[in-house]
Structures are given as C-alpha cells and as structure tokens.
Image (spheres, rainbow, N blue to C red):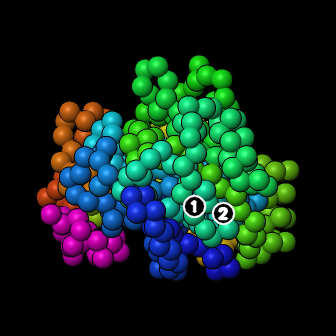
Amino acid sequence: MTTDRKIALVDLGRSEVETFPISMDLEQRFLGGSGVATYLFCKHAPKMCDPGSADNICIVSAGYLSGTLSAPLGTAVLTSKSAATGLMARACVDGPFAAQMRRAGFEHLVLKGRAENETCLLIQDGCIEFKEIPGLKDNGLSEQRAMLRKENPGIEAQLVCIQKNGDGLFFAADACLDLSKDVEGMEPDKSGVAEVLAAKNVVTLACCGTIELEVKDPEGIIAYEKKHLENIDESLIQNDPEPVIIEGPAGSVNLTEIKQTIEQCLGLPSGTKNCTNSSELNFQIAADRILLNTGLALDEDELKEIAYRCIAMERIYNLGEGITSKQGQPAEDYGENEWTREAVLKKEKVFEPLRIDDLWGRLKS
C-alpha cells in the first residue's frame, strides 16, 4: 500500500487531537469510508447514549478511493447515532470535500464531546485547528468560505457546513452546493446526523490540503479509466431485476445493500445526499480499481464478505441499542431476515467468522 492513511480522534470539549495510522488489517477487513467508520463507531461509541448529548460521537470519513481518478470528487460519509431514530445512521455528501480531506492528511475524523462555542474545524496538511468565527453559522456556504478566507489568508478550503431552515431541519452541504441564499428545494438530511453535529457546536468542516495522493499503478489506472470512459459496456452493469439475498452467519442481506455498502466504502458518488441504494455497482470493476490504486487484490466474494461484515456490525450495534417495531423499516427488515439478538450474539458462530471478535467485549451486552 502506498497511501498513508490516518485517523484523527478529535476531542471537541478539550480542543485536542490525537492521530494514529490505519493498519493494513483494518483496510483488509473494512476497506475505508463507511466500512472503517462503522468499525470505529462500534469501538468508540458509548452504549445507550442520547444522540444529542456530548457523549455521542460523529465520524466523518473519506472513501477508500476518494481523490483518485476512480473517484475524483468522491463522497464524504458522516456516521453517528441518529437524532431521528436513535440508531446508527449515515449521511453521504457528494463533492470535493472527501478528496480534499484526504489531501489534508486524514481518512477519518472521530468527533467526540461538545465544543464550548460554535466552531469550525480547519483541517490542513496533517493539522486540525479549532476556529471560533463570530457569525459563521448565520451565513450560507459562500459567505462562510469568504469569512474563512478573511480569517486565514491564502486558504482555499472545501467545506461541509450545517444549515438550518425555518422548520428546524439541518442540512449537510459541501462546495458543490450553494446555500448562500436559501435552502428552497434542498432535500433535508433525513438521517439525523447533521443534527448531531449541530448539537456538538460544529458549524463547519473545512479542508485544505496539498499532500499528494500516491497510487500503486499510476499509468495503469490512467489507462483503465480512459478505456472505461471510452468503452462503457452496458453488459458490465449488474442490475438485479429480482431481489438477491446474500446469506451469512448473522442473518441474510439483500445484494443491493451489499453494493451500496461497497460504494460507501470506496467513496463512489451516491447521487443523493442520503446514501440512496444503487444496483449498478460492478464487482469486477470495483476490484480492478482497488488493485490499480492501492495494490490490494480482492475478488467479488471478498468484496461481498467485506460489505456483509460492515452491515453486520451496524445491525449488531442497533440490536444492542434496542431496535423496536416503532423504528419503522429497519425493524421490519431485521425481523424478515432473522436478525435478532439471540442470533447475532454468538462469538464462535458469528463474531469470529466475521473477523470482528475484537469487538466482542463492546457489543456482547
């Protein structure tokens, strides 16, 4: 692997940052993006915490391929315990922020605690600064960018900001969306994750990076993407006319969810703000891109295993938090596919085959 991937543990209350590298083991088990984010959430999130409290954590992640020719812009994935459902949830933000976050030196930001005042996190070339800029939250994205430029001359950052409209709904936005005038026609963040960030007094995330993203085979990926653009073979698009079910040690999962999870791990644009399901991911193309960009060789079965592992972690966490029929579609899906606490809380039959036995102590009760 030629990339230097890092995680930052950000204590908002103390304005402190601790960084550590992402191991090859984590990459092989979870890739990146929502995969590693789900693992980090299960590892660090307190049990049964109030989503709006300082105890809840929010993880901001760049995809495994964000910023490469395979995903030049990419998707930033925000993972937290949702203020809307009380379950683990994520929101996806398409645009240049994820790529810039990687160029600023980080793959994942684990945000814990609550800032005393409304804060902008400025992420730049391996450093994270806590900026308190009066009036920042009262302005749209364009004005926020101008205010940051005035406070920090020479910095041209890509932003994710939290906005609020008259109905009290929060929005996650980046530099491809202009919230400078109003939010008419904007889709609200139904995941409830943006509301968590607002409760932490995080108004804006700003990234400005100059770190070069190295790839394993630069010439190979240039040729591959050029050929792919010139000769897109519609037969390679794996549409699923009928639901396909993937079986696993903890329960069954729809193939569409498997594909969506791989997209979120790699940072492929979702097309919407809130991670809509996709049926168009091709496993062979995904494996080729991973190999050429990172040197990590995976086949279709291994990609499906990674996706299943990530989905299982989320569901095991949610079951531990007490998912109920009142929580709508997620609860119905769990029941139909035999996801129960009795079925999943088995170390030898579930955790060990899924290679998540290091989470047993956190998730077993």
- Mark 2 Cα within 10 Å, few/some/many (few <14, many 20+)? many
Name the one closer to the observer, 355 or 280: 355
Q: Considering only order in the chain, which callout, 1 or 2, is on the residue closer to the N terminus?
A: 2
Name the one closer to the observer, 98 or 221: 98
Q: Amino acid at mark 1?
A: Glu
Q: Which residue is mark 1?
A: 129
State the extent of the magenta-drawn residues as a range.
345-365
Instruction: Give me the residue at 53% from left, 33% from top.
Output: 163
Q: Where residue 354 appears, x then y in whole percent?
A: 34, 70
Q: Where residue 116 appears, x then y in whole percent?
A: 40, 50
Does residue 86 show up?
yes
Q: Amino acid at mark 2?
A: Gln
Answer whether labels 2 and 1 touch (C-beta < 8 Å): yes
Name the one closer to the observer, 116 or 112: 116
**Vertical placement of residue 73 versus 288, above or below:** above
Instruction: Give me the residue at 53% from left, 27% from top.
Output: 187
Q: Which residue is mark 2?
A: 124
Q: Where residue 131 appears, x then y in whole percent?
A: 56, 53
